[in-house]
Image (tube, rainbow, N blue to C red):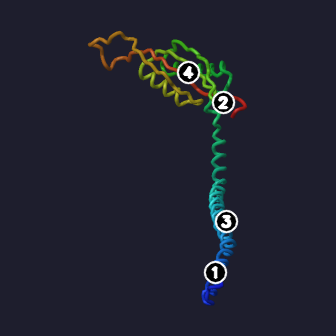
Amino acid sequence: MNLGALTPRQSKMLAGSILAALVLLILTIVVGPISWLYYHYDQAIDKQADLLARYSRLGATTADLARQLEALKAKNPREFFLKSTVPAMAASEVQEMVKTAVEGNGGKVISLQIPAHKDDGNFRKVTVNIQMSATVTATQKIFYALETQKPYFLLDNVSIHSNALRIPRDANPLGPEIEHIVQFDVFGYAVLAGRS
């Protein structure tokens, strides 16, 4: 294309087009990044404002949470755990409480065995295997006594076997209850020292 062969009108239009393209190029180079930065910082401001609102809501609950924490500390959660963390002492504590519950509710202890303890994180699980004889009613009372006292005990592997070989047909169904052999594990937890 020969620029000298253009008419004056075409030359003006070409100059105007080049000028417009140059102005658009300069605007794109200058305004584009500014626009992108504006969008980026606008998003960042919205995100920070949202975080501030969330943290303000959380901060408003600290007084209530502190009050709840103090109430929990006042309840003394240690009373739900065994006093001793030494396995033999803790097992003795469980043994004594089980013996008291069984004999106090009409049962007879046949045997008590102490298997090995298990450490589970910050807690020590102390188990005692019990074999006793008791009626069904007495067994219910014994289980209730064990599961509702402090420290908390949990029962596991409960097995109830009848002593009677057979019940005669002419036996009074409302007569004295038959004693059963009851075997179960009772366990409690102790908080390990220095880990709570």
Mark 2 / mark 4, whichever is N-terminal: 4
Mark 1 / mark 2, whichever is N-terminal: 1
Residue found at x 65% / y 64%: 40
Estimate the spatial distance between the alpha carbons at disc 3 and disc 4, rounded to whole Å. 68 Å
Mark 3 / mark 4, whichever is N-terminal: 3
Of the two numbered discs 3 and 1 in the rendering, the one whose residue sits closer to the viewer:
1
Estimate the spatial distance between the alpha carbons at disc 3 and disc 2, rounded to whole Å. 52 Å
Of the two numbered discs 3 and 4 in the rendering, the one whose residue sits closer to the viewer:
3
Q: What's the amino acid at mark 4?
A: Val
For mark 1, does the 10 Å Cα neighbourhood hold few (<14), some (14 to 19), or many (20 or more) residues?
few
Residue found at x 26% / y 13%: 170
Instruction: Answer with the quarter of the image where residue 125 lies.
Output: top right
Task: Say which residue label 2 marks.
Answer: 191
Estimate the spatial distance between the alpha carbons at disc 1 and disc 4, rounded to whole Å. 112 Å
Task: Say which residue label 1 marks.
Answer: 2
Mark 1 / mark 4, whichever is N-terminal: 1
Q: How many marks?
A: 4
Mark 3–mark 2 CB contact (< 8 Å):
no
Q: What's the amino acid at mark 3?
A: Tyr
